[in-house]
Amino acid sequence: MGGHGGLNILPQKSWNVYGRKQRERVRRDEEQLEREQREEAARKEEEEKEKRLRALRGEKEEEEEEKESGREGRVESVHENKHVNFFEEHEKALASLERKQKAKKSEEDEGNRLGGSGTHLRQPWYAKSDASFYDDEDDDDDDD
């Protein structure tokens, strides 16, 4: 009667790791990985053979020549005793960003303060005395 009760639907699922299709796919992937590793090892071995053969013939490799020419240039630059700043570009970018932020902040401070720009600060109607309340109404007509 099934033992556990309920349905046994796992074998029907495509994601079942114990299914025939999944096991076949894993086998194929493992074979492909092994094949790629063998090809990579063979390629590296061939490169090593070429390198050893050139060394026996007395030929210098292009990479070694570049390294030697780079070393000579480095020796000259070492004698200059200049400070090497690896982050110069980043520091310049940061400085320009800070300048932009300061400029933006000063614009905001002048034009967009809490309560407006401050050029037409008025008290609310309930904070004004009666005389100034009636006097200020005439100013509202001037804005239109």
Image (cartoon, rainbow, N blue to C red):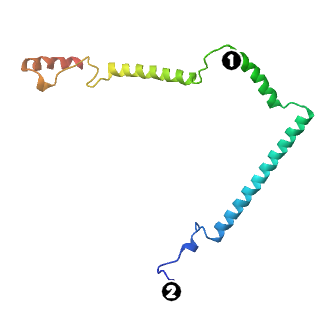
How many C-alpha atoms fall within 10 Å of the one at disc 2: few (<14), some, or many (≥20)? few
Left or right of 53, for residue 143:
left
Most distant residue in the top direction: 80
Q: Which mark is residue 141?
A: none
User: Which is more toward the observer, 142 or 6?
Assistant: 6
Picture quadrant where residue 69 is located? top right
Q: Residue visible at 37% across and 20% down?
A: 107
> Disc 2 on helix, strand or loop?
loop
- 3D distance between C-alphas at marks 1 and 2: 85 Å
Horizontal and vertical percent position of residue 58: 91, 31
Most distant residue in the bottom direction: 1
Q: Residue visible at 22% across and 19% down?
A: 121
Picture quadrant where residue 65 is located? top right
> Disc 1 on helix, strand or loop?
helix
Image: 123 above or below 15: above
Amino acid type, callout 1: Val
Q: Residue visible at 41% across and 20% down?
A: 102
User: Which is more toward the observer, 110 or 68?
Assistant: 68
Given contact means CB atoms under 8 Å apart, are the residues at marks 1 and 2 in contact?
A: no
Image: 37 above or below 9: above
Horizontal and vertical percent position of residue 31: 73, 60
User: Which is more toward the observer, 7 or 74?
Assistant: 74
**For marks 1 and 2 on the same chain, the one whose residue lies earlier in the sequence:** 2
Amino acid type, callout 2: Met
Return the residue at label 2.
1
Q: Which mark is residue 78?
A: 1
Nearer the camera: disc 1 or disc 2: 1
Horizontal and vertical percent position of residue 91: 53, 22
Query: Where's the C terminus, which quadrant?
Result: top left
Left or right of 32, for residue 122:
left
How many C-alpha atoms fall within 10 Å of the one at disc 1: few (<14), some, or many (≥20)? few
